[in-house]
Amino acid sequence: MDLFDLTGKVAVVTGGTRGIGMMMARGLLQAGASVYISSRKADACAAAVDELSSYGAVHGIPADLAAVAECQRLAAEVGEREEHVNVLVNNAGATWGEPFESFPEAGWDKVVDLNMKSPFFLTQAFLPLLLAAATPADPARVINVGSIDGLHVNPMPHYPYSASKAGLHHLTRALARELGPRSITVNAVAPGPFQSKMMAFALDDPTMREAVAASSPLGRIGQPDDMAGVAVYLSSRAGAYVTGAVIPVDGGIGTTS
Ligand SMILES: NC(=O)c1ccc[n+]([C@@H]2O[C@H](COP(=O)([O-])OP(=O)(O)OC[C@H]3O[C@@H](n4cnc5c(N)ncnc54)[C@H](OP(=O)(O)O)[C@@H]3O)[C@@H](O)[C@H]2O)c1
């Protein structure tokens, strides 16, 4: 089991207050890591820390990560408390759906800033802390949360979302090449449908939920352990030789359609 042991590791999960970020944060805590979670809302951070604290040492730091200065402040605040960071999970994300004809510039800016730009600047800001943890035998890890919508074409009218996720997947490969020689792995997880606020529009409706589940060869949507599992794998000794990968965790929806 020590292949997956994260005892003594420090992880940061953006958007860790709910949904996929919280699923990953819980998995990392259960594997032994201490975890910093971050999102815009201080009360959401406090509530999530409350919910997760039975699993291990968890801390919340609010930050609006669409702004580069906030990415830098988050890294600085973590750096005041920790000498190194082993795992950075760039998970915070947003979407915007609107018909093609009326799709506004504000929708592009919001989605691309958070989904594609901020993972770059967060990785840049955390670089000194990641380097302080990185060794050739046990690299530091960056995990970007992409989407199957960056792999296949979803018919929903969320153009910048799909484009930002495809961009994030490619950025993952570019950063893997840049940071590998410095003993930092960079991978992306491309989730299929998981219950969250972002997916409530589809999964809270029983008919749509059933249709989404039926679109998977496995016949179901993702469960929290599916996300916890991939986060622990990529963060642990088990995933030390994996970099530049985009791993679909989607029940085959994107990979077989
Ligand atoms: N759920 C799915 O089925 C699915 C599928 C594929 C990919 N994904 C990806 O998984 C990631 C998480 O999505 P989710 O479904 O868990 O969504 P969610 O429930 O809406 O959670 C988003 C998280 O990001 C935080 N956040 C939003 N804007 C932020 C900002 N400007 N700065 C800092 N934090 C911010 C939110 O907290 P605050 O509101 O407090 O800021 C929240 O913690 C996203 O990158 C999403 O694209 C999700």
Image (tube, helix red, strand yellow):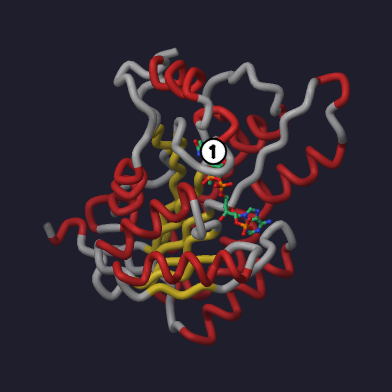
Name the residue at 50% across, 42% down.
Answer: 196
User: Disc 1 residue type?
Assistant: His
Query: Can you say whether 205 is above or below 96 in the image?
Result: above
Q: Position of residue 37 (x, y in %)?
A: 49, 66
The reply, left or right, for residue 63 in relation to residue 225 is right
Which one is in front, 254 or 216? 216
Name the residue at 50% across, 54% down.
Answer: 18
Regarding mark 1 in the picture, which secondary structure is present there?
helix
> Residue 210's image quarter?
top left
Instruction: Give the residue number, with chain letter if any, for mark 1.
Output: 169
Q: Quadrant of the C terminus?
A: top left
Count all numbered tags in the image, as a single digit: 1
> Residue 101's image quarter?
top right
Of all residues, the one furthest to the top in this rendering is: 257
Which one is in front, 218 or 114? 218
Callout 1 crowding tier (Cα within 10 Å): few <14, some 14–19, many ≥20? many
Which one is in front, 7 or 155? 155
The reply, left or right, for residue 137 in relation to residue 64 is left
Q: Position of residue 180 (x, y in %)?
A: 43, 55
